[in-house]
Amino acid sequence: MYTRIISTGTYLPEKVLTNDELEKIVNTSDDWIRSRTGIESRHIAADGEFTSHLAEKAAYKALEAAGLVPADIDLIVVGTCTPDRMFPNVACLLQERMGITGPAFSLEAACSGFVYALTVADQFLCSGKSKRALVIGAETMSRLIDWTDRETCVLFGDGAGAVILEASDKPGLLYSDLGADGQHRKLLYTETGLSNMESSVEGHLKMKGNEVFKVAVRTLESMVDKVLLENNLNKGQIDWLVPHQANLRIISATAKRLGLPMDRVVVTVNKHGNTSAASIPMALDTAVRDGRIKRGNLILLEAFGGGFTWGACLLRY
Ligand code: ACO
């Protein structure tokens, strides 16, 4: 038994925050942000708009694209590090609102949340436990950000992306590889959590950006070398790279290692910044809907994020 992605969907909150507007909030400039990251703007969830709301809208777009209804789904897996609350988890909130039965859970692997979620859903489908999964990456990173910290607030944004993954007798998802290494935990973390709560601390995201950058590039380069080796692929043989959208310079370094020109790399970071687990399904959806990614294309999804966690999925679309 194999699995294949049959449709995709995206939702971005209406409010757009441009680099020019950020210049009025912190001591930064459009030029600095663009040249270091490639980001031009990001979307910010409205008051009362939570991760589950974004996820639900992306899920309906994916269902509509497949011509399916919620009752056709029997598994929901959501990758998120910004859930509405600890429980019910975001997937259960969707299950109740959309009227879906079957297992529903969220997992947290920061920016790698979607590749982790896709890999886990694939296991459920391949084992025959489920037939059709809604796999979502959804985040409201704006709620984790210290809006006085220019080193982080310019980088992140909110959004959600969804795919429908279906059991199939033909291969779609060909290979996946996940990794993690907790030893760099002081480079990227949140100050508090629910069982580690200090009333004097607000719980914001903290990051040593330039050090994260170096580990991210190094780790992604060795991961893509492994993907090529283990799948008997030569450089340049992948049709499309759909990377986690954190920083254009990290994306370019990975593309170079894969022997791919930038016109075979899906880049959306300019429009929404780093949306953590949401970025890969949103980028995939963008390139599917604008016709760049076609059925039969060989696609590599790759991510690196807090934990550190990382992962890659190779698929025949
Ligand atoms: N505006 C203007 N200046 C700034 C800003 C800002 N928003 N932020 C930092 N600076 C200043 C710094 O204070 C520093 O000034 P100094 O030289 O006077 O000390 C200078 O810019 C350079 O700072 P660096 O941190 O060395 O800049 P760098 O070129 O490394 O770019 C960045 C910073 C964009 C954060 C980069 O390191 C990066 O993208 N890292 C990866 C982080 C990331 O994406 N994390 C997300 C999770 S992991 C992942 O998804 C890959």
Image (cartoon, grey):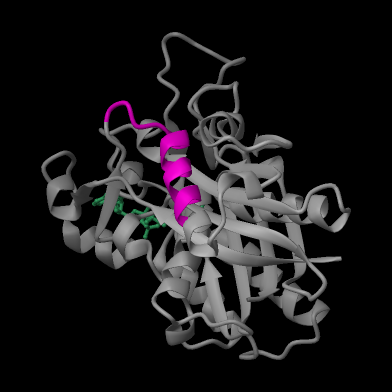
Magenta residue span: 47-61
Percent position (x, y) of residue 167? 77, 62
- Is 57 contained in the magenta span? yes
In depth, the one of 75 and 312 nearer the eye is 75
In depth, the one of 231 and 13 nearer the eye is 13
Percent position (x, y) of residue 183? 69, 42
Mostly what secondary structure, the magenta segment?
A: helix
- Residue at screen point 47% across, 43% down: 55
For the C terminus, give its image quadrant: bottom right
For the N terminus, give its image quadrant: bottom right
Residue 296, placed above or below residue 156: below
Would residue 90 appear left or right of 219 to someone viewing this image? left
Percent position (x, y) of residue 126? 84, 58
Which picture quadrant has residue 199? top left
Q: Is residue 244 visible?
A: no
- Residue at screen point 31% across, 42% down: 153
Residue 171, placed above or below residue 6: below
Would residue 129 appear left or right of 217 to someone viewing this image? right
Percent position (x, y) of residue 143? 37, 31
In depth, the one of 62 and 256 nearer the eye is 62
Q: Is residue 97 visible?
A: yes
Would residue 103 appear left or right of 186 to someone viewing this image? right
Would residue 189 appear left or right of 72 to someone viewing this image? left
- Residue at screen point 57% across, 29% down: 96
Residue 37, placed above or below residue 235: above
- Is 29 contained in the magenta span? no
Query: How many numbered marks appear?
Result: 0
